[in-house]
Amino acid sequence: MAFVRITFAKLKPNISLENTRKIWDGSVIPASKEQKGFIGGCLLVTEKRDEALALTLWENKDDALAGEKIPYYQDQVKKFAAFLAAPPNRKYYEVNSELVFMKDLEAKVGSLTFTKVKPGVSPEEVREIWDGSVVPAMKSQKGLVSLLLLVTEQRDEGISFGLWESKEDAVAIQKSGLYREQIKKFSVFIESVQDRKFYDVNSEIIFVKEIEAV
């Protein structure tokens, strides 16, 4: 099962996004490509420039964690030390969906919806709804580049993650009511839903292996 590590980092005021992108694209990704099981990743930054998310996708949990047993992971974090307001936190998620790509990886915006999941929820049931109903409903939406569903190993938190060509495209599904329609499909599984958050894509979106590896 594919595995995602998200590193959450608070940023200092007035940092240079150009410099963070150069480090990510020019140094972090080349180092990551050398790690066993690395599939891809991207760097996201809030519109306020106060928080960054580094998302990396791996073939399995062991490969994701292996880099933390050697200097690899900490070495990548150190490259951003001058930009960080506090030590970053990281969380791990299983990919509980197909990894869907509708078009070339030219996304400008990422959207994340964080949900608290009720105890005892079956990931298989959730995935059936996501792959069988949500993805078909979303595929026709203007500007959608990619879509996937993440869930913690503890099955207590889920993330709906999308990549879009523009924020206007991402917001359009909320204005049309489509976003709420998809949330309702999971109402029996969800304890609470946080607000949907938007991030600028501050990197190339890299995938070094065939999507079938997921």
Image (cartoon, helix red, strand yellow):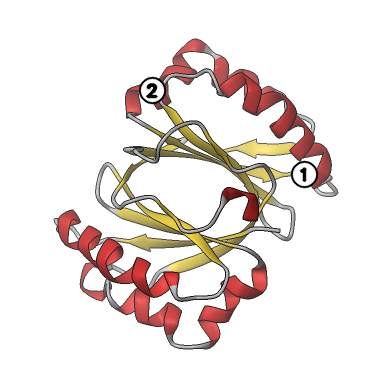
Question: Residue 23 sits in which quadrant?
Answer: bottom left
- Residue placed under numbered mark 2 in the picture: 169
Q: How many labels does the image show?
A: 2
Seen from the viewer's position, the closer of residues 50 and 165 is 165
Q: Where is residue 193 in the image (x, y as percent from the top left)?
A: 60, 36
Which is in the foreground here, disc 1 or disc 2? 2
- Quarter location, residue 177: top right
Horizontal and vertical percent position of residue 95? 65, 51
Q: Tell me the amino acid under the disc marked 1.
A: Lys
Classify residue 87 as left or right of residue 124: left
Residue 120 higher or lower than 107, as above or below: below
**Disc 1 versus disc 2: distance between alpha carbons?**
30 Å
65 lies left or right of 45? right
Task: Judge left or right: residue 25 versus residue 173.
Answer: left
From what the image shows, is residue 208 above or below residue 44? below
Q: Name the residue under label 1.
A: 118
x and y percentages locating residue 160 in the rendered image? 57, 39
Q: Residues within 10 Å of mark 2 (few under 14, many from 20)?
A: some
Residue plotted at (63% across, 18% down): 181
The amino acid type of the residue labelled 2 equals Asp
Quadrant location of the N terminus in the rendered image: bottom right
Q: Name the element at disc 1.
A: loop
The numbered disc on residue 133 is none
